[in-house]
Image: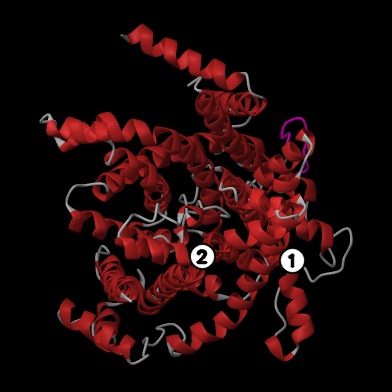
Amino acid sequence: MRFLAHRLLLFVAALFGVSVLVFVALRILPGDVAAVMAGTAATPDRIAALRTQFGLDRPLITQYLDWVGGLLHGDLGTSALTGRAVVAQVGQRASLTFPLIILSLFIALLIGLPLGCASVLANGRRMRGFLHVLAIVGGAVPALWSGLLLILLFSRGTGLIGIFPSQGFPSEGWHNPGRALSSLVLPAVATGIVAGAGIMRYTRAAVGDVMDGGAIDMAMACGMTRTQAVLRVGLRLATPQLVSVAGLTFAQMITGVMVVESLFALPGLGALLIGDVGNRDLIAVQSELFLLAAFFLLLGLVIDLIHRALDPRLKAADATGTDAGDGTTGSAASKGGE
Amino acid sequence: MESEGIGRVFAALRALWRRGSGRYALIVLGLWIAVAIVSLFWTPQPLLATDGYHVWAQPSAAHPLGTDGTGADVLSWLMAGSRTNLVIAVLTVICSGALGLLLVGLMVSRSAGLASTTVAVVDALISIPTVLIALLLTVPFGASVGVIVGACSIAYGLNLARIARPSAMLAARSDYVESALAGGASGWYAFTRHVVPNIMPVLTVQLTISAGTSVLAEAGLTYLGVGVGAGVPSWGHSLSTSVKLINVFPLTVVWPGLVVTLAVVALNLLGDAFNSAMDEGSL
């Protein structure tokens, strides 16, 4: 319980910190926000009008409090370019990006978990070496490149075997689920391969750690075969770590996802954010950056809580006051998949 | 003193060379550095030589990898790009190493409040992706090499601290640190002499892998327009250019991506070789 309170407090503090950071980063621009938004050819009148429209002529602290007050009420401001509410824009784009990330993660797990277990179980030196190199090469491919190669291989029009659309998203969106899903397949595979290689490495490491602990030997002494012991006991004991890894992979995949969104011309969150940064739509950028950062902080919180719920050893370590030996070593996924 | 240092470097290189993974890594990294140095003095075509009559050209004797949309030579830009990526990788290793060590130092500090606050901050921030940090830095500072190095250093530094913490904790609570402190040694002395050597293996392996990840990050961020500025040669720039070539001459797409992949594989294998050499005690 103390842990939960502590972690929640930290989450709120981190949210506050991020909001200040985002606000400051957008205010230390050379010149002021209104001048940047209006562009180089703007008349002073236009700049002054923008400044009044967005309340940029007020003291910084008032602006900040106003913004945060809006955030707390779910009001993220209005985009200067489109005049639409930022909330609506983000919501619409997220309906593409989140399915894409989840599909990528699903593919990554589909690749990573079996291959990770296979590399623990592999008997021959050669097989082991092959799987090891496979994991390294898979993790070293830039998402942009794997996307390009997939287009060359499988896209209609350009590819050798034209089965998937090469670019774009159906204009009717998810009202046409079949087409929508098929246009997400190639992008998801492009990011899923890289992330899958990462998951494969961590699965091998986590299950390998469990084996060193003797639980597998115990299970085998009770009559399980090696394969059974690894899959039933090893994988179960490694689950808390693997959940952490999957969660962090989710966070890390976002760079790759933004890249493939752009490559496959998908109107997702990445495209929105990059477009707004390019257009200097700073009011929108401010809220979008904060919203994304908040989402990832929340994700980190959820991962920590799930990890804890799944691994009673951490709680026991807390109760006796000893250091848990950092049960999160497996979750220290290196920032891969970019 | 100096010759002893050089001798140790040679011994380390020999230990790496004896392993297949280390040998591949050293060859690729050697080529990378060599090309970067050569590109300072010579490239097949001058970088800024454009030719409006031969844009999107097929590979030929004059342009082994073809030309891009301004008629500039793709191979020359790829060669010059290895410079930028080398700089980014080296700076990222230095900065993320420094940040990681600083955080580890705070985590094992004797002040319980400071230590637990640092652990908490690292845990809270670990899930923020590199690209968000880069976007946050791009808005005020504009796209540049510095933004990539900054974003990668923060992200990898946090990661490094989290990974190195268990072994740093073990070292910081060991008897020899206790006795050093009891003997009047300063906390700084104990940290640099006793804790840092203990986390050196983890640090070396992790930083080597981070160097590889910085290459991938550069490619992604530059494509998104928040990486190196326009007109600066880099592998990410070449890769982004090759995207536009896909309909004109598809095979050109293969080269920049292959270069990036080979380099990242080399850095990962180097990390492996470091790991096994240190396990064996030959480093």
Q: Which residue is mark 2?
A: A251
Tell how many labels: 2
- Are the residues flagged by discs 1 and 2 in contact, CB closer than 8 Å? no
> Of residues B176 and A320, which is closer to you in this image?
A320
Mark 1: few/some/many CA within 10 Å (<14, 14-19, 20+) = many
The residue that appears at 39% across and 33% down in the rendered structure is B200
Query: Compared to B258, does A159 lie above or below?
Result: below
In the rendered image, is residue A172 in sight? Answer: no
In the rendered image, is residue A316 in sight? Answer: yes
The residue that appears at 41% across and 39% down in the rendered structure is B93
Q: Position of residue B78 (x, y in %)?
A: 61, 38
Marks 1/2: CA distance?
20 Å
Q: Which residue is mark 1?
A: A186
The magenta span reads B57-65
**Residue A131 sits in which quadrant?**
top right
The residue that appears at 56% across and 32% down in the rendered structure is B270
> Of residues A241 and B22, which is closer to you in this image?
A241
Chain label for disc 2: A
Q: Position of residue B129 (x, y in %)?
A: 46, 61
Residue A308 falls left or right of residue A265: left
Secondary element at image label 1: helix
At label 2, the amino acid type is: Ala
**Residue A250 sits in which quadrant?**
bottom right
Quarter of the image with the C terminus of chain A in it: bottom right
Quarter of the image with the N terminus of chain A in it: bottom left
